[in-house]
Amino acid sequence: MRRLPIRALALLTTAGALTLTACGTQTTATGTGTAGTGAERTVRAHQVMRLTTPHEQTGSTLLEGPVLDDAGRLTVVDVTAPAGAPKVLRVDLDRKKARTLHTDDRGAYTSSQFSPYDGRLYLTDYAHGEIVSLAPDGGDRRVFFSGDVDGAPMNPDDIAFDETGDLYVSDSRGLTEGKAEGRVVRIDRSGKEASVLVDGLAATNGIAFDVDFGGLWYSELTRNRINYLPLDGRGGVTAPHTAVRVDGGVAQTDSIAVDADGNLYQALHGRPAMAVYSRTGERLATVEVPARAAEGLESATNVAITPGGTTAYMTVSGPAGGYLFTFEALGEGIRQSNGG
């Protein structure tokens, strides 16, 4: 999530004007070139449809959290949607039509993902520090978690579920103040126990497990880097380390997805593109929106890759509106590349 205009945030929260990241947007130049050397290649994304236009009340639109259900239907969230406008949308990819799955007068939702434990759709409410869940049909809204973690409130951005349904959350705390107070937080599947795994991070953003759930990849927006956190298999962690330093130019590191080959798809805020890396840190490809379609588009926030296939759907937003683009992924989709 990227930095959002104060006007949009003031209208989205009663707790004051917050600055969102990977749901946060500052206006930046749109890059169209390709960086990197060696075997890196360019993957062209193609427009599927426009889903939203900028909202008059908030002055923007920002699509996030694409996730496919078992029936192949896509769900996305619009972070800056005002009260009454669609905040969670269900997309019929065959008919290229979208409908409202959920709206309310409060939430600023920055990610969505289905739980492997109870099958419900989980959303992060960045502005209010909550994680809520919905029934698959969009009804039965419940607050799963709210409140402080280790004495400090959260600004939850993205989610990664482990195989048992426990949640790992990128907490972008400190972004507004420009302080390195971000965290990686673990919440058990009951929503009753929360603990901090890593702290001192600069605007924690994307988060995803590796292929075998042996560790977590997570990004820091304002440091333009991806870190790796090994897990010990007993709920504990070992020492994290910087895994990839992203040469993004005007762009910053947003959400992360991982395919069946272990490749990392790093979304970019400030450029309608994604950088793809191998698990060893090699830059493999850049997914780009063609120049003719990129006007008015500033960020590619996240991606969902069809489970067992290579068709990928990328959420892209800017002054021109919120769009869905598609491309062929380098590897097949798994849970780690479907929502977050």
Image: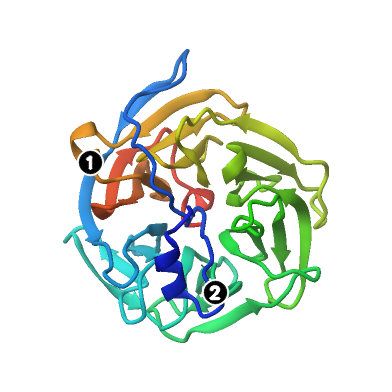
Q: Mark 1 touching mark 2, by CB under 8 A?
A: no
* Whether residue 63 is situated above or below residue 290 in the rendered picture: below
Residue type, numbered disc 1: Glu
Q: Which is nearer the eye, 117 or 17?
A: 17
Q: Position of residue 218 (x, y in %)?
A: 63, 46
Q: Which residue is mark 2?
A: 16
Location of mark 1 (residue): 295
In terms of secondary structure, where does tag 2 sit?
loop
Query: Left or right of 156: which side holds 294?
Result: left
The structure residue drawn at horizontal position 70% and vertical position 48%, both measured from the top left corner, is 201
210 or 221, nearer to the observer: 221
**Label whose residue precedes the other's in the sequence (1 or 2):** 2
Relative vertical location of residue 6 with respect to residue 37 in this rendering, above or below: below
At 76% from the left and 53% from the top, the residue drawn is: 199
How much space separates mark 1 and mark 2, taking CA atoms?
32 Å
Describe residue 86's horizontal placement relative to residue 241 as left or right.
left
Disc 1 versus disc 2: nearer the observer = 2
Could you tell me if residue 176 is visible in this image? Answer: yes
Q: Looking at the picture, which amino acid does disc 2 mark?
A: Gly
Q: Where does the image place residue 194, in percent across and percent down from the top left?
A: 75, 69
- Model colouring: rainbow
Say few, some or many: other residues with alpha carbon within 10 Å of mark 1 (under 14 / 14 to 19 / 20 or more).
some
Q: What percent of the width, then of the height, locates residue 312?
A: 35, 45
